[in-house]
Image (cartoon, rainbow, N blue to C red):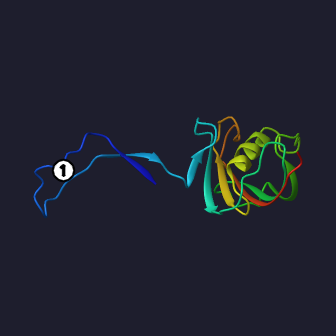
């Protein structure tokens, strides 16, 4: 986590054992990422990795599960297979954009959950948020 101090800070004249209150601003939190900058799709890292990133056009072996957040029913979709970043994925509709953006920011063997809020560009028009559990299992470079 990267924090920034909101005011200039001078340590001159501080006495030992003095309580001090600092006002901090969260600048960056690597475990959560707003994929499109509009709070419509938030990626949260579940299992990080030191692997490499895929590139646009790469084919990736992925597994994913799409559920309605808080819903008691079965998942909307559970799949495992090869996904081409930037390719056509008609079965995913607009969620393909979320998959592309998430995968490009992931590393090999990383696991994430992307939450798409309702009434947002990628979430349902009403109801609960969608959650996409996504694992990048392998990267096949095709260029």
Left or right of 94, for residue 27: left
Q: What is the quadrant of residue 60 in the picture?
A: bottom right
* Dot 1 crowding, Cα within 10 Å, few <14, some 14–19, many 20+: few
Q: Residue shown at 19%/54% (left/top)?
A: 20
Q: Position of residue 7 (x, y in %)?
A: 27, 39
Left or right of 75, for residue 140: right
**Residue identified by numbered label 1:** 11
Q: Residue shown at 65%/36% (left/top)?
A: 119
Left or right of 38, for residue 135: right
Q: Position of residue 101 (x, y in %)?
A: 71, 43
Callout 1 secondary element: loop
Left or right of 124, for residue 13: left
Quadrant where the C terminus is found in the figure = top right
Q: Position of residue 10 (x, y in %)?
A: 19, 45
- In the image, residue 45 sits, relative to residue 100, either above or below, namely below
Q: Residue shown at 78%/58% (left/top)?
A: 64
Q: Residue shown at 64%/49% (left/top)?
A: 115
Q: Nearer the viewer, residue 2 or 118?
A: 2
Q: Position of residue 1 (x, y in %)?
A: 46, 54
């Amino acid at each position: 986590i990267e924090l920034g101090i909101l005011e200039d800070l001078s340590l001159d004249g501080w006495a030992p054992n003095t309580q001090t209150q600092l006002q901090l601003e969260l600048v960056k939190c690597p475990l959560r990422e707003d994929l499109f900058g509009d709070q419509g799709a938030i990626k949260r890292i579940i299992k990080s990795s030191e692997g490499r990133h895929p590139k646009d056009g790469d084919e990736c072996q992925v597994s994913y599960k799409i559920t309605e957040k808080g819903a008691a029913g079965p998942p909307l979709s559970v799949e495992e297979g090869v996904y081409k970043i930037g390719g056509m994925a008609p079965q995913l509709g607009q969620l393909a954009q979320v998959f592309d953006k998430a995968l490009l920011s992931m590393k090999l063997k990383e696991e994430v959950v992307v939450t798409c809020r309702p009434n947002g560009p990628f979430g349902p028009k009403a109801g609960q948020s969608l959650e996409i559990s996504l694992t990048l299992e392998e990267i096949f470079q095709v260029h």
